[in-house]
Image: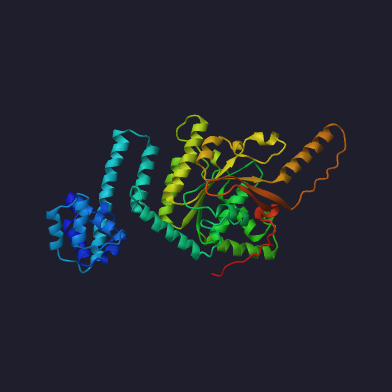
Amino acid sequence: MSENRLHNLNIERAVLSSILFDPALYEEAAAKLKPRDFYLPDHSSIFEAMEELERENQPIDEEFLRKKLLQKNKFNEDVFIEIISSSPLSNSQAYIGEIKEKAVKRELVKLARQIKEVAIDQDLPSDDVLDVIQKRLYEISLDATTKEFRDSSEMVISTIKHIHEMKKRGNNGIIGVDTGFRELNEHTAGFTEGQLIIIAARPAMGKTSLVLNMAQKALDDGRGVAIFSLEMPAEELMTRMLSAKTSIPLQNLKVGDMSDDQWSDLARATDVISRQKLFVDDDSLININQMRSKLRKLKMQHPEIAIMIVDYLQLMNGTSGKDRHLEVSEISRGLKLLARELNMPIIALSQLNRGVESRHDKRPMLSDIRESGSIEQDADIILFVYRDDVYKGRAEKEKEKKAKAEGREYRSTFIEKPEEDAELIIGKNRSGPVGNANIVFQKRFTRFVDKGSPPIEIIYEEK
């Protein structure tokens, strides 16, 4: 491609001239263009100066623009005269779009050169090369630029805007994705953009069920959800979600043993879920680079994706082939950076060490997380799922087994209940208090609910 086809100085001059002629056009241009989108450095400096004048609530006119450029030592008399002498545009929108189009093409040309550099000159592994390409393509597609320091005035404006947006939500205390649990929302205000949330538990505590309940809440709120399921196939996840949504016992769903009313409920639930933005990748051999690549691509195709779930962290493969602790550090740091990059919360499930079983009080703590150092450091929120009845039931079975081996009769007083009290222990909360959230686990439906909440009504939206 000829270099001349990647820029048009006449159009750049005309757009800048139109803004000086009618400063109201600046907002239209600023909605699409950044200073770096202008090919000529002097044009870029002029648009940057216009940006500063607008932020300072100063007039965007010839006199103030000249003064601003002189202050920054970026005033070019010849270029300035050319712009002033250019005729204003009658259709500025089309020309603004043309500047953007050429800027994107220049970025793609730069990427092509970068691919050659990392693939041939630096001889990087193919996975690393693909990661570089995917990340840069994602940035270009979102018109992302490298972030610079943000000054206090810009941050104050952004913060006040955010506060007003929260006010419009009705002062419900939730500023992020609703977790679906009242007490947990009170501690966390919901899961917010850029957060890495770790949900950890020993096996059979219900951490997968919990996170699927959270996913269903997000879906019902109109948000998109992406799940990387390394432990179970997508069909099994969907079966659990359908059981929780329809109040049909999971075991009945698995074998198809349902009444006519339950079949009708199932049909309505599948119709609703099939229209929601749920995406599941059940590749059990995925690594952090592949996960980044897939999620970036999905986010480009479906910007409504608002939360990602990984089930579970220790099953992910590393890319270094080094010590497992170093690989887990790479994975946890990669997930945190990905949450920041895509501006969305990421929930990762994690296993706990066996050491918790040997304590009298088996409630988990931060040190119980497998390879806990890096995970604890990278996570914004760490939640532990704890059900005391699980341990009570296991203890009774051990007593029965021991008595049988000794030829004794043992009558257990433990009664397995259809609903068990459970705790969400907030072990770390970077932006709020730690503590406990009390919930209830409904076994038959693999569903957690708020303690004291009324029976769940099955409500289906109309098409």
Classify 362 as above or below 102. above
> In this view of the protein, can residue 39 be seen by the observer?
no
Q: Residue at x 83, y 43 (%)?
A: 412
On the image, the x and y values in percent for residue 160 come to: 43, 59
> In this view of the protein, can residue 115 be seen by the observer?
yes
Q: Residue at x 13, y 54 (%)?
A: 77
On the image, the x and y values in percent for residue 11 come to: 19, 60
Classify 462 as above or below 314. below
Classify 112 as above or below 54. above
Q: Residue at x 45, y 32 (%)?
A: 320
Give the position of the C terminus as an image quadrant.
Answer: bottom right
**Along the line of sight, the residue nearer the viewer: 48 or 363:** 48
On the image, the x and y values in percent for residue 41 come to: 20, 50
- Colouring: rainbow
In the image, taking residue 151 as reference, residue 89 lies left or right, namely: left
In the image, taking residue 431 as reference, residue 386 lies left or right, namely: right
